[in-house]
């Protein structure tokens, strides 16, 4: 059974304090690993898709990396507007559905 | 591109009534749409997957007679919660995928409260 575990559950940082969020996964044949951002009361917003180990993608202050067992979302010099819940999900080859982790609630204090 | 809308954003209904939630892909054709349920401070739980023109595939434990899903066109899917009860109160979110793409684009969600 596919499993996704995110850590930490919650993270508080000061503005400008860089850190990383972890997503560990177990899947039989990975098609893709997805990162989303979700604000309270809103639907998830797509950030990145990673397909193979060693792949990296960047968007503004965010950088996602992938290994065969885990993915990291690195946040560089975060701002208060980066506060949100970050969700990781995996998709198995041949499947349409996503399996989500429980998310990391990130708070950036000014 | 890849904008998904949901209507209504919030709905309150009485126990025993039915409520319909619409999910639309505004700027692309969605061959596949998904319906999720999310409890407070919890992650998304997939309820069903629907391909245009086909019957929806429900996840284990989801009552297909209670949660009716229709995907009649490439831009519209509906979720009808029949004979709603307070335990059906939740945040319902849809997502949509383009043909040949793996990414899912999510709608803004619908907050359902059953009194």
Image (cartoon, rainbow, N blue to C red):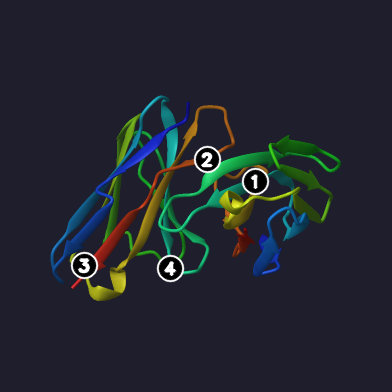
Residues at circles 1 and 3 in contact by the CB criterion of under 8 Å: no
Where is residue A65? Give x, y as percent. Answer: 79, 45
Numbered circle sitting on residue A6:
none
Question: Are the residues flagged by discs 1 and 4 from a single subunit?
Answer: no
The secondary structure type at the circle numbered 4 is loop
Q: Gap between marks 2 and 4, in whole Å?
A: 20 Å
Q: Which numbered mark, 1 or 3, is in the foreground of this view? A: 1
Question: Are the residues flagged by discs 1 and 3 from a single subunit?
Answer: no
Q: Earlier in the sequence, mark 3 or mark 2?
A: 3
Residues at circles 1 and 2 in contact by the CB criterion of under 8 Å: yes
Q: Gap between marks 1 and 4, in whole Å?
A: 21 Å
Numbered circle sitting on residue B39:
4
What residue does disc 2 label? B104
* Drawn side of residue B98 relative to residue A55, left or right: left
Where is residue B103? Give x, y as percent. Answer: 57, 37
Say which of B32 and A17 sits in front. A17
Q: Characterize the local packing of mark 3: few (<14), some (14-19) or many (20 or more) Cα atoms within 10 angstroms.
A: many
Q: Which numbered mark, 3 or 4, is in the foreground of this view? A: 4
């Amino acid at each position: 059974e596919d499993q996704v575990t995110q850590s930490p559950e919650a993270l508080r940082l000061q503005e400008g304090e860089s850190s990383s969020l972890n997503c560990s996964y177990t899947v039989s044949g990975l098609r893709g690993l997805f990162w989303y951002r979700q604000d309270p009361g809103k639907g998830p917003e797509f950030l990145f898709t990673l397909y193979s180990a060693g792949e990296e993608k960047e968007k503004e202050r965010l950088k996602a990396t992938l290994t065969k067992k885990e993915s990291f979302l690195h946040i560089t010099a975060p701002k208060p507007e980066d506060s949100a819940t970050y969700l990781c999900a995996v998709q198995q080859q041949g499947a349409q559905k996503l399996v989500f982790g429980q998310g990391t609630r990130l708070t950036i204090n000014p | 591109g890849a904008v998904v809308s949901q209507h209504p954003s919030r709905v309150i209904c009485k126990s025993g009534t039915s409520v319909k939630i619409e999910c639309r892909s505004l700027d692309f054709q969605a061959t596949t749409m998904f319906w999720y349920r999310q409890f407070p401070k919890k992650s998304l739980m997939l309820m069903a997957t629907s391909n245009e023109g086909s019957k929806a595939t429900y996840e284990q434990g989801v009552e297909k007679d209670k949660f009716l899903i229709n995907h009649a066109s490439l831009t519209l899917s509906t979720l009808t919660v029949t004979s709603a009860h307070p335990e059906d109160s939740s945040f319902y979110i849809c997502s949509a995928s383009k043909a040949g793409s793996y990414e899912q684009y999510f709608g803004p969600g619908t907050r359902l409260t059953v009194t």
